[in-house]
Image (tube, helix red, strand yellow):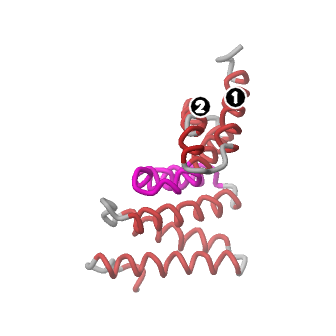
Amino acid sequence: QLRREQPSSVKARGDLGASLHLAGKLAVRSGDLEASASWLNEAAALRASLDRKGCEKVCEDVFQTNIELARVSARLGRLAEAAQASEAAATALHGILDRKPGAISPYARTLLQVGNLRRKLGAAEAAIAAYTQAARLGPRLREAGAEEGVAIAAAQKLIVYLRRVGRAS
């Protein structure tokens, strides 16, 4: 019953989102990936409804829930759901990059993950776009004192994939 009713206050919705997220994490630990996906999906939907303007914590929570949902979905073989959750995670972090430079590294890793998932799904344009975005983050990663390896890996995957789809020589 509680899961079907959305609280009216922002704080209560945030708290419920945190509880649903925790339930999803606990379900993973107990080996019930289906239940985990359900809990995390509900947490992601609830957290997505929260106003993110100027709130780093909400953006980080949306990111974390979606990145964990992506992992569970991928383990269940639901690559399209994993890609959607990864894209939602990247979108959440994109909103705070200017205010929180340390978010650039997980953002780049998430874009690389989106590219990999979209490639596996045969969505060439989406994969190329994600790899390109991640590869272009090299200078920002360097400025933030983060490892540039993700950008380099994305650039390499982009080159290989463009060759595979006949768009590079």
- Mark 1 element type: helix
Disc 2 secondary structure class: helix
Please rate how many residues cluster around mark 1, counting C-alpha atoms within 10 Å: few if below 14, some from 14 to 19, many from 20. Answer: some
The residue closer to the viewer here, 165 or 10, is 10
Residue 124 falls in which quadrant of the image?
top right
Q: Earlier in the sequence, mark 1 or mark 2?
A: 2
> Where, by quadrant of the figure, is residue 29 drawn?
bottom right
Relative to 47, is 159 above or below? above
Residue 100 falls within the magenta-colored stretch: yes
**Which quarter of the rendered picture does the N terminus lie within?**
bottom left
Q: Which residue is mark 2?
A: 128
Residue 30: x and y in percent read: 71, 81
Residue 7 sits in quarter:
bottom left
Task: Give the residue at the far left of this rendering.
Answer: 8
Please name the amino acid that badge 2 sits on.
Ile
113 left or right, relative to 102: right
Position in image of residue 166 (x %, y %):
68, 17
Q: Residue furthest top?
A: 169
Residue 68 on image: x %, y %:
60, 65
The residue furthest bottom is 1
Rendered image: mark on residue 161: 1
The answer to the question of whether label 1 and label 2 lie on touching residues, with beta carbons closer than 8 A, is yes
Magenta-colored stretch includes residue 142: no
The prevailing secondary structure element of the residues shown in magenta is: helix
- Left or right of residue 162, residue 4 in this image: left
Question: What's the magenta region?
Answer: 78-107
Identity, as a three-letter code, of the amino acid under mark 1: Tyr
Would you place residue 131 above or below residue 117 in this image? above
